[in-house]
Amino acid sequence: MIPSPTHSPPAPSSVSESIGKYRWVICALVFFATTINYLDRAVISLLKPYLETEFKWTDADYANIEIAFKLAYAIGMVGAGRVVDKLGTKIGYALSTTLWSIAAMGHALVSSTLGFGVARSFLGITEAGNFPAAIKTTAEWFPQRERALATGIFNSGSNVGAIIAPLSVPFIAEQYGWQWAFLITGALGFVWLVLWLVIYDTPSNSKRLSKAEFEYINADIPVGLPAEGVTEEKPKASWATLLGFRQTWAFVIGKFLTDPIWWFYLFWLPDFLKKQYQLNGTAIALPVAAVYVLSSIGSVSGGYLPLGFIKRGMPAFAARKRTMLLIACCVFPIVFAQYLGRMNMWLAVLVIGIAAAAHQAWSANIFTTVSDMFPKRAVASVTGIGGMAGGLGGIAFTALIQKQLIAHYSDQPDMAYFITFIICGSAYLLAWALMFALVPRMEPIQLDEPKA
């Protein structure tokens, strides 16, 4: 075990490459977990044409199955955060991955529409553990100045998973049947699980981490205070306590308003391309992959942008705030996606891709606001609360907007998607305004110390 530093940590600008880079190995592990997580959840959107044929689904049936996933995900999120804070990142992440991999493979055994609803529910509640565990891992392994970048890198795994899915799932379904698409993608989680259990440990317990890198990771901790995880564990804050902070509600509102937009891209983009441009099967692969390639770029760039502001002397929270406003403005052009698409499909794909990239950049920063303001022992719990809000927002978006619009404009799919894109383009600016009205300045949370 590496001891807590007793002297002042070096200033970030004076830290040399000799401190080591093992923290980026951990970031790579979280990246691959997130890739598999999103690959597993994206499979069904690409198998929709096959499953519609076999099970006679309507768009309403598919929307209901999507809602089942999101409801379970929302419920799972708040519970997963508590589990990860209680069990720790190593065991909590491993448990979540094991269960969601089983759930993903279990889809292959389903033989009815109801069965898919059950399978998606189990997948949703188990996949919910990924982000609380990932954000807590990042808070443990990175200093504040690098967390948005690390979050952007691992979060880009969601895009890589969404890229791999259209390039592989239709091919597997065509060659071997839709069941094998669920089995093969689901099995990847067990490969990751072995690597995680062999490689991962917390910084204070890692034998592969140098003392210099440990001190750099904990450079934000005031001199004289121990690094979290080194001393006796402190009690976890209750949900009631966490919900009493404006900082929690700022994160909750931001997730509630913007997570549904990403869900929309993930579950309805193939349907949009099919209805607008008559693309099916493997023909959808390239435009969908292009959107998520742009998303990956946005995720990493969104992590770099505040780091650039910080290097110029701007406080971390102010850098995050400015970055998120710029990102919110980048989403708005999606309102014109269909107009541009009439000239050329790829113009629509480009605008949607930029909006998706902006969402991922937003995610890299909104997640980091949690570790900016809350102590590490509460990060997973707050992330879970926000994730639950995002899931509930996704349910509302599907049930009240997407599903109703599709039903109302069943003979005018152009209008349904046009209204949806207006909502997508406006959500981030509204979220930014509300978040920073609640928390206009950096106000770190001080949770009560255990009573003697």
Image (cartoon, helix red, strand yellow):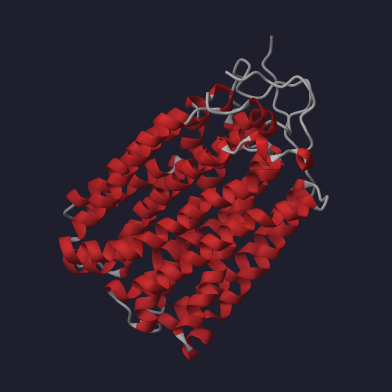
In which quadrant will I find the N terminus? Answer: top right
Above or below 202: residue 133: below
Seen in the image, is 287 located left or right of residue 202? left
Q: Is residue 223 above or below residue 342?
A: above
Which residue is at the far right?
A: 313
In this rendering, the count of numbered labels is 0
Looking at the image, residue 130 lies above or below residue 360: above
In terms of depth relative to the viewer, which is nearer, 59 or 53?
53
Q: Which residue is drawn at the image coordinates 45% and 40% (left, top)?
A: 129
Q: Measuring from the top left, give residue 449's x and y in whole percent.
A: 70, 19
Judge whether residue 89 can be spotted in this image: yes
Which residue in the rendered view is the most extreme toward the bottom?
343
Residue found at x 39% / y 82%: 276
Residue 202, image x and y in percent?
Answer: 54, 27
Give residue 230's quadrant in the image: top right
At 71% from the left edge and 51% from the top edge, which residue is drawn?
A: 307
At x 77% / y 33%, what residue is drawn? 10
Outermost residue on the front side: it is 18
The percent coordinates of residue 365 (x first, y second) are: 64, 52
**Quadrant of the image containing the C terminus:** top right
Q: Is residue 216 above or below residue 53?
A: above
Position of 380 with respect to 321 (left or right) is left
Quarter location, residue 308: bottom right
- Residue 257 visible in the displayed image: no
Q: Position of residue 402 (x, y in %)?
A: 44, 68
